Image: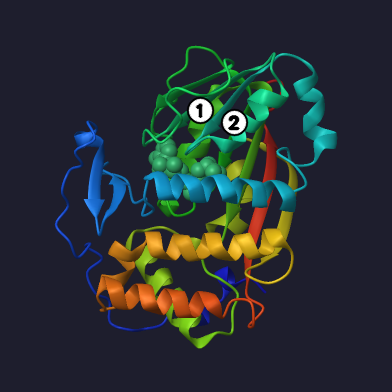
Amino acid sequence: MGSCTSKSQISSQPQTSDKPPMKAVTSSNGSASRTRVLAEREYHNVESSTYVLPKDDQEKDRLHGQHYVLKEKFGGNLLKPELTAKLFEKDINVLDVGCGPATWLMDMATEYPDSNFYGVDIADTFPQAIHPRNLKFQVANVLEPLPFDFKFDFIQVRLLTVALRESEWEIAFRNVYNALKPGGIFQVIEGCPLLNTTDPEMIVIRTNMAQLVRKKQQNPDMSSQLEIVMEQENFKVLYKQAIELPMGHGTPADIAAGDSYKEVLLGMAPFMAPQMNVDIEEYKKLVLKAAANMGPTKTTISLWGYLGQRPKDN
Ligand SMILES: C[S@@+](CC[C@H](N)C(=O)[O-])C[C@H]1O[C@@H](n2cnc3c(N)ncnc32)[C@H](O)[C@@H]1O
């Protein structure tokens, strides 16, 4: 049973402020208005956003590694190739929304050199200079109409669970729907940020993470229920796949998944430490101890993949 649906982990501990413990300062790298630095990590500076992960080189490296774990676990870059691969036999327009450092896009644009690939992200984390010629990037927020004057054949959203408030998913999916051609395909891959674990320290971290994301009006259970939002926004749901991914035990990809999750927890330090009423260093020590126990306690994370289609006559 995925921890996402377990009510027991939402404890009734008194809630503390989720304000980061350090004063936000702007970076000196020329993107001052887009960046704030907390506990020596760089974060986006979009006031309206609830996204809590960094956007610095360390996070880009993590996302590159995580891409290859997801690719292996879902059997490739496209879910259910029987439904999706045929589309790519023609030259098509493809968009990845919230693309981050764009590893999926770089992989896909190299594999399909005659198609046109686009990436948008609220933060300017995508590669600026070195990328395939058939790949372009733009800063954009999925909560606003997507900034293109043409429609796409295929759009992906991957891993926005700790980026969107519960009420924002329908807005995001509506914007994707409006950017798709009739008959176009929407691929979604999401994970529950709350691990399935018996490790007491990881359970404390998980309980506090559940409280933190709830305070931010996010719903950690969202990733298991997205077909409901898809249907509500007029997509025809073609496919749903659930994966239980071992963390820190099993194959090299499973070990890498555990390392990646440890990095997620460390990246959330400026938000999680005050949530847990500890200082940043103490929080990091707790994370390292809990992460070392993911293997022995056979910890897992729950992931879901979805395919939806904008109806051909709509
Ligand atoms: C966990 S990362 C995933 C990146 C990429 N999709 C992947 O799978 O590797 C989430 C990304 O979503 C971006 N993001 C967060 N909120 C967003 C929004 N409202 N609109 C567009 N991108 C957003 C973040 O800046 C970050 O790059």
Give the CA distance from mark 1 to mark 2.
Answer: 7 Å
Up-down relation of residue 116 to residue 80 (above or below): above
User: In the rendered image, is residue 63 in sight?
Assistant: yes
Instruction: Name the residue beneath numbered marker 2.
Output: 105
The spot of residue 273 in percent (x, y) is 29, 71
Up-down relation of residue 43 to residue 199 (above or below): above
Inspect the image, locate mark 1, and give the three-letter code of the amino acid beneath it: Gly
Up-down relation of residue 8 to residue 18 (above or below): below
Residue at image x 20%, y 36%?
32
Indicate which disc residue 218 carries: none
Question: Where in the image, quadrant-wise, is ligand 1 located?
Answer: top left
> What element does badge 1 sit on?
strand
Considering every residue shown, the one lying at the far bottom of the view is: 200
Q: Residues within 10 Å of mark 2 (few under 14, many from 20)?
A: many
Location of the N terminus (image quadrant)? bottom right
Q: Earlier in the sequence, mark 1 or mark 2?
A: 2
Instruction: Name the residue beneath numbered marker 1.
Output: 119
CB within 8 Å, label 1 to label 2? yes
The spot of residue 113 in percent (x, y) is 69, 17
Q: For this rendering, which residue is in front, 81 or 7?
A: 81
Q: Answer with left or right where residue 22 lies relative to residue 75.
A: left
Q: For this rendering, which residue is in front, 256 or 114?
A: 256
Up-down relation of residue 17 to residue 309 (above or below): below
